[in-house]
């Protein structure tokens, strides 16, 4: 895929395609060209709709001192330019509601300037640059991606659904109608659970529901399922429908957290009871946990044949088929519309079924191999299936660490990642490698984890990397921000991906269900993929950027010490304190300095994405 770019005078605009989102990167020739720079105004024109300006969460303290477009709010980027050299445009944040248009988008970005008195001058169209790019669910050849939105802790979520939105009815029913009213938006409009789920589940939900829609609607198709957490009502309803028709088999985890106790019935146990009552042969369900967990999240679609079913499509990734997995966690799915890849996953399912999803799978030849794929529609991809023998488990993770180390040796090297944990208790080489990345000033590193220790936030005047947590403790956001809900004891970041070599021909993303820990590779039923494709890796990198930028701010707003970093010290005056905390936009170009300081991470960032 092309990376559209445009240049106007000394200003350059680039657009990178993500999954139903666009990364816009800006650059100016040098620091002199950024003299009196007030930021960037971003206009978006969706297909067949009127153009609009994206919103800045911030505004000027005194908008009346600046040129303003009266028809736009004070925080519109035409009135309050963006103080960053890149911007991630995610559909459905504040414009177009919860059902945004897909297709060709035109982005027009204009650098804005202050006059000598610090007032914003009128927008100058002669400085504007425009690019056109496809915006929609990511698809390339026979590969499709999907990501959950993963932003319950956000202004946009509160804007659409309020601070105290429910994720399921207060009644304890296992399966419920998702088209029932869930709550009222802050503007007083009713919304349903399905409205909420569509927004939160985003393209990951779309990809999963596409597969269920195809299989349920076509009696010539059969579905095999690996599931870990299972309690999403629409998923369960469709699985039960397929069970009644004899067109589904499920390997469902039965580790202790998915087994009932005297005080609580596990959703997985309750679902198994319903499935068994309604199933028609050859539909069947198998409960197992390999050595520790049956941790895959996989859907395998096959054509029903007289002798043996023919696999045609497979969905994998980190997304559990649960309310939390789809609507709270940050997660991904990968779909291969390819019989060869689907057949490999089908063979693994058959082998797991044969050994009753026990530790015996680790003795299978399937657990000791790396399977490689590549065709006109499928980029070079390697897949491994665990649980592995110990030496193979170590080799699988060592390969990833070696790729990270290779990136550290390259000029302009980069590693971006989102992983559920990097805690010191987990075994294996990956987490120490990721934790150590931030200290290396010769590489651009940007990462997020749900681990709350060892966090490293951006430090002005340093090129060291950033590692944030998706679980800030007791965040209290300053005005004009709304407060956001917490994920509590659950996970925000449930991804398991690492991107090496952003926007290079040798770019690769490691992804899938593996937690990237040695214990899991030796004891869990998992799959780990390495996809060697610049466009696929870019889409994952954009996800990491959005998460890190968002939670860097939330982490800075956390209680002192809660994320390994204290709040900023107070400055001399309330005005300076407000501006340094980001309550108002500054009225000088001092914010630009780090972007042209060769010793600052912001400068590396500008050159990597906009240079």
Image (spheres, grey):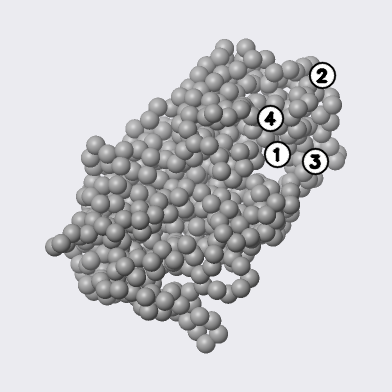
What residue is disc 2 on? 117
Label 1 CA crowd tier, 10 Å (few <14, some 14–19, many 20+) = some
Q: Nearer the viewer, mark 4 or mark 2?
A: 4
Measuring from the top left, give residue 256's x and y in whole percent: 44, 78
Density class for disc 4 (Cα within 10 Å; few <14, some 14-19, many ≥20) is: many
Q: Residue at x 84, y 26 (%)?
A: 64
Work out whether residue 141 or residue 481 is closer to the camera in this orientation and state it: 141
Q: How many marks?
A: 4
The residue sitting at 85% across, 40% down in the picture is 574
The residue where tag 3 is placed is 577
Nearer-N-terminus badge (1/3): 1
Instruction: Say which residue label 4 marks.
Output: 77
Q: Quadrant location of the N terminus?
A: top left
Q: Are marks 1 and 3 in contact (CB under 8 Å)?
A: no
Q: Say which element carries label 1.
A: loop
452 sits to left or right of 280: right
Up the image or down, 118 lies above or below 323; here it is above
Query: Which is in the foreground here, disc 1 or disc 3?
Result: 1
Whichever of callouts 4 and 3 sits on the residue coming sooner in the sequence is 4
Q: Which residue, given by chain and number where applicable, does mark 1 sit on?
A: 57
Q: Which one is in front in this view, the residue at disc 3 or the one at disc 2?
A: 2
Residue 460 spot, x, y in % from top left? 64, 37
Under tag 2, what secondary structure? loop
Mark 3 surroundings within 10 Å by alpha-carbon count, few (fewer than 14), some (14 through 19), many (20 or more): some
Q: Earlier in the sequence, mark 4 or mark 1?
A: 1
Which residue is more in the foreground, 180 or 443?
180
Q: Is residue 95 above or below residue 559?
A: above
The disc, 2 or 1, on the residue closer to the chain's N-terminal end is 1
Real-space CA distance between mark 3 and mark 2, rounded to the nearest whole angstrom: 21 Å
């Amino acid at each position: 895929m092309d990376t559209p770019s445009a240049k106007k005078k000394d200003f350059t605009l680039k657009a990178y395609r993500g999954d139903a989102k666009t990364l816009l990167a800006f650059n100016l020739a040098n620091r002199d060209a950024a003299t009196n720079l007030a930021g960037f105004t971003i206009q978006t024109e969706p297909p067949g709709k009127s153009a609009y300006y994206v919103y800045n969460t911030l505004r000027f303290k005194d908008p009346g001192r600046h040129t303003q477009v009266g028809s736009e709010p004070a925080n519109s980027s035409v009135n309050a330019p963006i103080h960053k050299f890149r911007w991630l445009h995610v559909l459905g944040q504040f414009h177009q509601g919860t059902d945004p248009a897909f297709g060709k988008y035109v982005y027009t970005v204009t650098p804005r300037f202050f006059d000598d008195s610090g007032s914003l001058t009128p927008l100058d169209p002669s400085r504007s640059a425009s690019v056109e790019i496809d915006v929609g669910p990511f698809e390339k050849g026979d590969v499709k991606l999907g990501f959950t939105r993963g932003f319950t802790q956000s202004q946009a979520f509160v804007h659409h659904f309020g601070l105290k939105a429910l994720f399921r009815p207060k009644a304890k029913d296992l399966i419920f109608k998702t088209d029932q009213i869930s709550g009222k938006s802050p503007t007083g409009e009713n919304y349903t659970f399905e409205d909420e789920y569509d927004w939160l589940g985003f393209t990951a939900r779309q990809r999963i529901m596409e597969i269920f829609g195809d299989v349920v609607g076509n009696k010539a198709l059969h579905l095999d399922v690996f599931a870990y957490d299972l309690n999403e009502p629409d998923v369960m309803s469709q699985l039960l429908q397929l069970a009644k028709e004899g067109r589904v088999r499920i390997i469902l985890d039965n580790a202790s957290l998915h087994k009932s106790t005297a005080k609580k019935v596990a959703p997985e146990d309750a679902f198994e009871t319903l499935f068994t009552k309604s199933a028609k042969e050859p539909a069947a369900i198998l409960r197992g946990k390999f050595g520790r967990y049956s941790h895959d999240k996989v859907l395998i679609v096959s054509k029903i044949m007289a002798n043996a079913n023919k696999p045609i499509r497979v969905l994998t990734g980190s997304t559990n088929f649960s309310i939390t997995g789809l609507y709270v966690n940050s997660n991904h799915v990968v779909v291969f519309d390819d019989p060869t890849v689907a057949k490999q996953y089908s063979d693994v399912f058959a082998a797991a079924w044969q050994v009753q999803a026990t530790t015996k799978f680790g003795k299978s030849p399937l657990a000791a191999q790396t399977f490689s794929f590549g065709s006109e529609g499928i980029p070079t991809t390697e897949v491994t299936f665990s649980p592995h023998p110990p030496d193979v488990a170590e080799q699988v993770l060592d390969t990833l660490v070696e790729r990270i180390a290779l990136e550290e040796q390259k000029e302009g090297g980069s590693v971006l990642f989102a992983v559920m944990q990097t805690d010191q208790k987990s075994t294996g080489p990956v987490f120490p490698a990721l934790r150590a990345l931030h200290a290396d000033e010769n590489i651009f590193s940007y990462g997020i984890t749900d681990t709350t220790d060892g966090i490293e936030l951006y430090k002005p005047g340093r090129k060291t990397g950033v590692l944030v947590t998706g679980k800030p403790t007791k965040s209290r956001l300053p005005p004009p921000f709304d407060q956001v809900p917490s994920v509590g004891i659950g996970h925000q970041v449930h991804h398991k991906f690492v991107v090496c070599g952003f926007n290079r021909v040798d770019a690769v993303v490691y992804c899938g269900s593996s937690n990237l820990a040695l214990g899991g590779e030796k004891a869990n039923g998992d799959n780990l993929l390495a996809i060697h494709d610049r466009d696929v890796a870019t889409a994952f990198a954009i996800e990491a950027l959005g998460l890190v930028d968002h939670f860097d701010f939330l982490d800075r707003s956390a209680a002192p010490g809660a994320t390994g970093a204290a709040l900023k010290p107070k400055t001399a005056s309330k005005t300076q304190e407000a501006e340094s905390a980001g309550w108002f936009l500054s009225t000088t170009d001092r914010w630009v300095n780090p972007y042209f300081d060769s010793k600052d991470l912001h400068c590396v960032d500008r050159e990597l994405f906009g240079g």
